[in-house]
Amino acid sequence: MGTAATLLAAVAAATPAAPAERTQQPFNWRDLDWAQYALNWGVALVILVLGMWIAKRLSQWLHRALVRARVETTLSNFLRNVAYALLLVLVFVTALQKVGVPPTSLFAVLGAAGLAVGLALKDSLSNIASGVMLIVLRPMRDGDHVVVAGQEGIIDEIRIFQTRIRSFDERMITLPNSTITTAPIVNYSTLPNRRLEITVGVGYGDDLKKAQQLLLQIAQDNPNILETPAPFVQVTNLGESTVDLMLFAYARNGDFGAAKSSTLENIRNRLLENGLSIPYPQRDLHVYHHDADGRPIAELLLKGVTDDGETRQGPPLAR
């Protein structure tokens, strides 16, 4: 018995005791270190206010540097806004981390929120992406004369979501940027000169060489027409009532409207002064009337023949 008791005591001593059950203690506001808690929030508030001030100053400094570097206005404004937004994100993350929010959890929440917002605002995000392309690639700039998506006018402002075009009849047209990037863009301001093409029809009986020389002389006498490249004239079509000549001449973008108007006026006046016609479309109609036997209707009327073949005296025809 003594030996058995000794063995049981040894086994009991070698067996580890079972761990005590852990009990979750309820949160007690009195256990909170209020001094440290207030200090963390105070530091976070200072980081937030000071960080926003620094972000604004840095973005303004970047904008001034880009302006001094002669970067296009739309691009410099866009880069300033992007830099300011990135700095604000950094400031908010730093402030939240100071009050105990883990950065990984914050980024996970922001990622999920960004995915949801992206699905809900895919059209708006498409406009933003198109706006970035327009600003970076710069197929057109503020003040350019363009034709895009069937609209013609002067670029008033390129924004991140949409572009405003001022038409020549003083209308403000707003186009989504995604529409612009998927449509052909005709920019008349990219090159300094623009070609003027005017079609003039002369009669088949007129002297073509004389007409060509006259058109060239009109272009050469116009102060708004450039000497180089030199204007030239070609025969472009043999129409129903005219031989079509086309005058090709070049003018600067700013003088294009005046050059076209004065050239058209001078062409009309000089052609008439030199005996050259400007025919309009016309058709000669010849009508032949015969009865069933092939006799002319006019002759039958003179003889007074009726539809049944009987002869009667008809009224005299007017001469």
Image: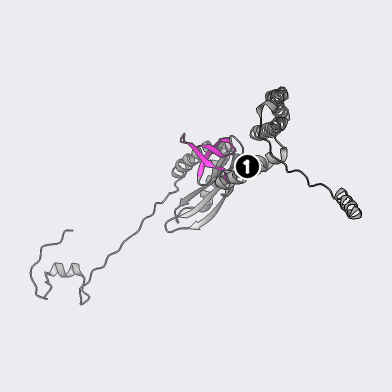
Q: Residue at x 64, y 43 (%)?
A: 133
Badge 1 amino acid: Leu
Work out whether residue 317 can be spotted.
Answer: yes
Residue visible at 19% across and 67% down? 298
Quarter of the image with the C terminus is bottom left
Q: Position of residue 24 (x, y in %)?
A: 69, 39
Number of numbered discs: 1
Q: Quadrant of residue 109?
A: top right
Relative depth, front residue between 3 and 160: 3
Q: Is residue 169 magenta?
A: yes
Q: Which residues are magenta?
A: 151-180
Residue 93 lies, with reference to residue 46, above or below; the image says: below
Examine the structure image and report whether residue 181 is included in the region drawn in magenta: no
Task: Find residue 145 and report its horizontal and vertical position in percent.
Answer: 56, 39
Looking at the image, which residue sits at the far front? 1
**Colour pattern:** one colour
User: Which secondary structure dominates the residues rendered in magenta?
Assistant: strand
Residue 185 image point, x, y percent: 58, 46
9 and 170: which one is in front? 9
Quarter of the image containing the N terminus?
bottom right
Mark 1 element type:
helix
Is residue 51 visible in the rendered image? The answer is no
Instruction: Work out whether residue 159 or residue 42 is closer to the camera in this orientation and state it.
Output: 42
Q: Which residue is mark 1?
A: 134
Circle 1 packing at 10 Å, graded few (<14), some (14-19), many (20+), is: many
Q: Residue furthest left?
A: 312
Residue 22 position by quadrant? top right
Q: Residue at x 65, y 44 (%)?
A: 111
Q: Residue furthest bottom?
A: 293
Answer left or right for 205 relative to 143: left
Q: Residue at x 42, y 59 (%)?
A: 240
